[in-house]
Image (tube, rainbow, N blue to C red):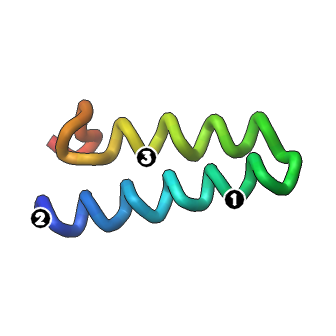
Amino acid sequence: MGIILWIIAALLVISGVFAILRKQILWGIVLIVVGCLVGPGGVSLFT
């Protein structure tokens, strides 16, 4: 389960960075924050 959470978190953060690069600042910030919350190092939403 931990590996799946890492993959999901990484995809969310990468998507957030690309959104910021495409000038979608708010959406990018939301994706990065959600990625940090989902990751095993953050506050997991699934526990």
Identity, as a three-letter code, of the amino acid under mark 3? Gly
Q: CA distance from mark 3 to mark 2?
A: 15 Å
Rendered location of residue 7, percent (x, y): 31, 67
- Can you tell which of label 2 and label 1 is closer to the viewer? 1
Q: Name the residue: 16% across, 66% down.
A: 3
In this rendering, position of residue 38 left or right of residue 21: left
Residue 19 lies in quadrant: bottom right
Residue 1 lies in quadrant: bottom left
Q: Secondary structure at mark 3?
A: helix
Identity, as a three-letter code, of the amino acid under mark 1? Phe
Q: Name the residue: 28% across, 40% down.
A: 45
Identity, as a three-letter code, of the amino acid under mark 2? Met
For residue 37, above or below residue 39: above
* In the foreground, 39 or 20: 20
Q: Which residue is mark 2?
A: 1
Rendered location of residue 46, percent (x, y): 22, 46
Q: Secondary structure at mark 2?
A: loop
The numbered dot on residue 18 is 1
